[in-house]
Amino acid sequence: MRLDKFLKVSRLIKRRTVANEACDGGRVMVNGKTAKASTKVKVGDVLEIQFGNKTVKAEILKIADTTKKEEAKDMFRYL
């Protein structure tokens, strides 16, 4: 699955356009490397997202094309 779509579906970032901008700005890293929006992610990958001066680190636990709001938090685990 594309990184920008995963960020939106998992609700780590609310909108796909915002996820795209974060990736283009170099604020998203996958497994320690700066990632583009089109980067393919898989279960076990570690994401780091910079929100201003705060950094969020999460591990991907499962991937789904769509999900309900309550189930979205089960797609990743904060580190």
Image (cartoon, grey):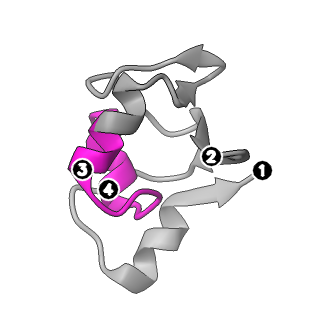
Spatial separation of the CA atoms under disc 2 and disc 3: 18 Å
Can residue 41 be seen by looking at this rendering?
Answer: no
Question: Which residue position holds label 3?
Answer: 16
Question: Quarter-wise, where is residue 23 in the image?
Answer: top left
* Cβ atoms under marks 4 and 2 closer than 8 Å: no
Q: Earlier in the sequence, mark 4 or mark 3?
A: 4
* Amino acid type indicated by mark 4: Lys
Spatial separation of the CA atoms under disc 4 and disc 3: 5 Å
Q: Nearer the viewer, mark 4 or mark 2?
A: 2
Question: Which residue position holds label 2?
Answer: 52
Q: Earlier in the sequence, mark 1 or mark 3?
A: 3
Q: Position of residue 59 (x, y in %)?
A: 63, 45
Number of the label disc, if any, that sits on residue 8:
4
Q: Is residue 78 left or right of residue 5?
A: right
Q: Is residue 54 left or right of residue 11?
A: right
Give above or below for 15 relative to 58. Answer: below
* Amino acid type indicated by mark 2: Gly
